[in-house]
Image: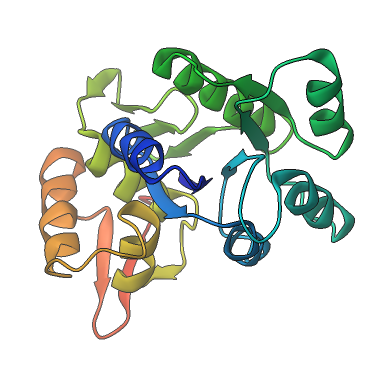
Amino acid sequence: MRLLIVEDEKRLALSLAKGLTAEGFAVDVVHDGVDGLHRASEGTYDLVILDIMLPGMNGYRVCSTLRAAGHDVPILMLTAKDGEYDEAEGLDTGADDYLTKPFSYVVLVARVKALLRRRGSAGPSPVHTLGNLKVDTAARRVFRDDDEVTLTAKEFAVLEQLVLRTGEVVSKGEILDHVWDFAYEGDPNIVEVYVSTLRRKLGAALIKTVRGAGYRLEAPR
């Protein structure tokens, strides 16, 4: 899943991004409200972590503008302020949860995962079955027949992009954008390495290469 952090304290933002990336998320970071609103409006994020005190446009305005435009992406607000009024104002503008600085990183991760689970429970089932393969995108577990297959966070994230679009062609660029982040400057062939590993662990016939276009996950017949 892809997260957007809108936080002007650069050291905090990068620290959060590093930790959440290790949790298996793709994370983008911006440092002002206007850029944050622009990025969040693209509709490509599963959750936004939004500071209130931002240059250009504060978090309240970013949140209310997104909601007024019909964007329902979960928003976790961060602020150095404290008090019932600030929390009420944040929630009134459409935020889904509120965390006051300083906060525990463990608590933040728990809040993020809870919001994502809540969003998933309102949509289609997180369990996808393809022949003898079962992928649970909420629990982040994969089973082949009755045996669990151990995947790294990145391996699961690549598989998830293919599972969510089973039968469709997913380009290498789309996988890079969702699994890594917009600032990734490494070798794009890293996607091929992960696809190769998934084929070895899950079965070579599961992921088809569509020459010049990308990859397609096909349910066994």
The number of numbered discs placed on residues in the rendered structure image is: 0
Q: Residue at x 41, y 14 (%)?
A: 106
Nearer to me, 14 or 187: 14
- The answer to whether one can see residue 204 in this image is no
Name the colour scheme.
rainbow
Nearer to me, 64 or 211: 64
- The answer to whether one can see residue 43 in this image is yes
Nearer to me, 104 or 2: 104
In the figure, residue 130 lies in which quadrant?
Answer: top left
Lateral position of residue 62 relative to residue 172, left or right: right
Vertical position of residue 212 compared to residue 34: above or below: below
Q: Position of residue 22 (x, y in %)?
A: 26, 33
Q: Residue at x 65, y 33 (%)?
A: 77
Nearer to me, 130 or 117: 117
Lateral position of residue 188 relative to residue 108, left or right: left
Q: Position of residue 42 (x, y in %)?
A: 62, 66
Q: Residue at x 24, y 19 (%)?
A: 147
Q: Position of residue 194 (x, y in %)?
A: 16, 52
Lateral position of residue 124 relative to residue 71, left or right: left
Vertical position of residue 48 compared to residue 78: above or below: below
Q: Position of residue 119 (x, y in %)?
A: 67, 33
Vertical position of residue 39 compared to residue 198: above or below: below
Q: Residue at x 86, y 23 (%)?
A: 88
In the figure, residue 205 lies in which quadrant?
Answer: bottom left
